[in-house]
Every structure is written in C-alpha cells, then in structure tokens.
Image: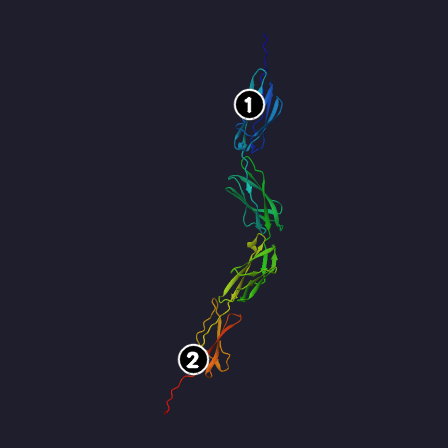
C-alpha cells in the first residue's frame, strides 16, 4: 500500500485598509500548495465592482465601492482549492468611510472688502480648508454648525472674478475641492452738481451728475412719482406738476447700475414752491372808505407774502382801508408771492356811493 502525503495549503491576505467613498480597495491573497485561487463577494449585499489580476499563487482583488456601501463594512472572500485537501477560505473586511460633500455658492462683493461672508454648507463637526487665489486674502474664518464661512478682501485694486475653493474633512476622509466664483466690484462713485435746490410750480430743474465712476447707467427716481426727462447723458430733468397751491419737497435719486446700486446711490432735495391763487370779491360801500378784509393766503405748507394795492390815481390804500377821492368804481388788487417766485394777483372793482343826506331846509 502506498500512502501519498500532501503538504498543507496556505492562504495569506494583506492587512485590511479602510477606504473613502468610492476610492478602490485593494487586497492581495498569497497561496501555496493549491491548484486555484479566486476572490468573490456577496453580490446581493455589495453592489460595487470587483476585479482581479494574478495567478493561483498570488492574486490581487480591486473593489470599487458603490455609493450604497458608504458607512458599511465590506467583506471580500479569497478561496483556494487543492488536489487532495479540499478548499480553504479567508475573508478580507474593510470599512468604507463616508466622504463629505460640501456645497458652495458664489457671490458678488461691493468694494475691496466683503461686508459679509462666503458660506459653505458642511456636515456639523467637520473641518474645512479654504483655497484662496493670489490677489485675495482671508480676513476671517469660522465654523458654526453646518456653516463654514470666510470673509475675504482684495490685496490690491484688481477688481473682477476670483475662484475660491473649499475642502471638507471628517475624521477619515476629505472631499474633493468644490469651487465658486466671487466677484469683487468697485463701488460706484457719483456726485451731483447740487444737493438742494428750489423751483417754482410749473418750472423744471435738471439734476446733473458731475462725477461718475465704476458703473454704466442709472435708474432715476422722483419720490413723488413725477416725470423725469432722461434725454441727456448724466442728466435728469424734473418737471413739476401743473401750478398747484401746495408746497412740497421731492427727493430725486440716482441709482448706478453695476450690482452695487445701494452703495453708490445719491439723492438731492428739490423744493417746489406753490403758485398762489389769491381771491377777493367786488363790493359796494356807502361813503369813500372801504375796510380791507383780512387777507388769507391761498397756499399751504409755506408762508406767502400778501399785499393790497390799487392802480387807480383817484384812490389809495392804507394799512386798513381802501380810500377813494370821489364816488365811482376803482380797482382793488390783492397780490400774493411765495419766496422769489412770480407774484400773482386778483383784482376786483370796489364801488363807492355817496352817503345820503337829510334836507333840513325851510321847504
């Protein structure tokens, strides 16, 4: 009887190494005294891709995780067969760590310094590393919960677009860098010829921009909704409403259009004086004196100047009376004026009738 002795088979696996996300995991199996060597996985559990290269004595398995593997332990099995000693298996188990996925949205910054922050959304408890290009500096950074924020500033005067990047890391893995565009815009500069002016009702006034930098156009606004004539470049002409008796102030605002409107807008105050509408009534009096009525101003919101007068050479006005030299009808005029605006008058005829006298003669 012959007895055949076979050497014991051996199967040795490389040490497990955890991976991040969909990074491939590599395991090497080394075998002796065997006839075949294979790698396998449970396809019902692990949806990633398994590829192998090598021989029956040494074979490497490369497993590329599926997204569903994140946070799981993955087991690969190495199996050898022998001519007379059956099969031998060993498991290679590694962990697939989750990879952070930050998000970052660009923004526009007015001026050389950010008044706010560029904010990345991250997983609470993670850390970040910012990538700042030449020409921009990091002024301040902080993490609060799920927000990682950074305050930026130009190091010079090269306004324009800059690409900012951020990488998020947890205990085991780091994300790919995500980027966003940050646009630094020079603040618009605008100056008017005047910041206060006064016109009379029915007149117009032109606001002129004497200095303008870092923008292309304007939006003009009149606070009373009045019409602005924009036919001339860098000018806006306000046309006051039809003659009115109410005093008003109008704010005229120019908003430069470059994305930093609010930081560069300028306003001026235009006072519109009203046009008076004085009113007096004709009268007939006995005698040669007419008591002047109390003159009431016709405008509101401002004090007007009122004055009584006559154009007749046969009558005159005192501080309280209109006095005629003889019987008849004579013109009485009430003139009203606001500021330096044109005065307006109303004129009516006052008729003077001689008082009757009693005849105490002998008849």
Residues at badges 2 and 1 in contact (C-beta under 8 Å)?
no
Q: Nearer the viewer, residue 232 or 92?
A: 232
Q: In x, y percent, where is residue 27? A: 58, 27
The single residue placed furthest to the front in the displayed view is 363
Disc 1 target residue? 90
Label 2: which secondary element: strand
Q: In x, y percent, where is residue 311? A: 51, 79
Colour pattern of the rendering:
rainbow
Mark sitting on residue 285: 2
Circle nearer the viewer, 2 or 1 = 2
Mark sitting on residue 233: none
Location of the C terminus (image quadrant):
bottom left
Label 1: which secondary element: strand
Q: In x, y percent, where is residue 268? A: 54, 61
Q: Is residue 343 above or below residue 154?
A: below
Q: Nearer the viewer, residue 336 or 67?
A: 336
The image quarter in which residue 1 lies = top right
């Amino acid at each position: 009887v012959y007895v055949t002795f076979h050497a014991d088979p051996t199967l040795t696996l490389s040490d497990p190494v955890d991976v991040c996300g969909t990074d491939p995991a590599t395991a090497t199996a080394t075998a002796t005294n065997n006839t075949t060597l294979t790698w396998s996985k449970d396809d019902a559990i692990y949806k990633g891709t398994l590829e192998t290269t090598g021989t029956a004595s040494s074979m490497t398995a490369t497993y590329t995780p599926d997204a569903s593997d994140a946070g799981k332990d993955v087991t690969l099995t190495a199996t050898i067969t022998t001519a007379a000693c059956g099969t031998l298996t060993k498991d290679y188990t590694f962990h697939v760590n989750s990879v952070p996925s930050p998000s970052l949205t660009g923004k526009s910054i007015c001026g050389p310094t950010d008044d706010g922050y560029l904010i990345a959304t991250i997983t609470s408890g993670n850390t970040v590393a910012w990538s700042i290009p030449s020409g921009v500096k990091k002024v301040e950074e902080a993490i609060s919960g799920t927000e990682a924020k950074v305050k930026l500033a130009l190091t010079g005067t090269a306004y324009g677009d800059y690409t900012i990047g951020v990488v998020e890391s947890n205990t085991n893995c780091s994300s790919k860098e995500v980027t966003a565009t940050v646009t630094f815009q020079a603040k618009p500069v605008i100056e008017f010829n005047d910041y206060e002016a006064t016109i009379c009702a029915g007149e117009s006034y032109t606001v002129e921009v004497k200095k303008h930098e870092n923008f292309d156009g304007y939006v003009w606004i009149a606070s009373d909704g009045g019409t602005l004539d924009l036919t001339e470049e860098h000018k806006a002409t306000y046309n006051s409403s039809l003659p009115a008796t109410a005093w008003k102030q109008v704010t005229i605002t120019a908003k430069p259009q470059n994305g930093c409107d609010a930081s560069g807008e300028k306003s001026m105050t235009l006072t519109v004086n009203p046009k008076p509408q004085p009113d007096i009534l004709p009268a007939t009096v006995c005698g040669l004196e007419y008591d002047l009525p109390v003159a009431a101003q016709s405008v509101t919101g401002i004090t007007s100047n009122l004055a009584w007068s006559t154009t007749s050479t046969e009558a005159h006005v005192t501080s309280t009376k209109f006095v005629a030299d003889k019987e008849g009808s004579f013109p009485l005029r009430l003139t009203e004026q606001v500021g330096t605006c044109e005065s307006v008058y109303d004129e009516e005829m006052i008729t003077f009738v001689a008082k009757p006298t009693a005849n105490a003669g002998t008849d």
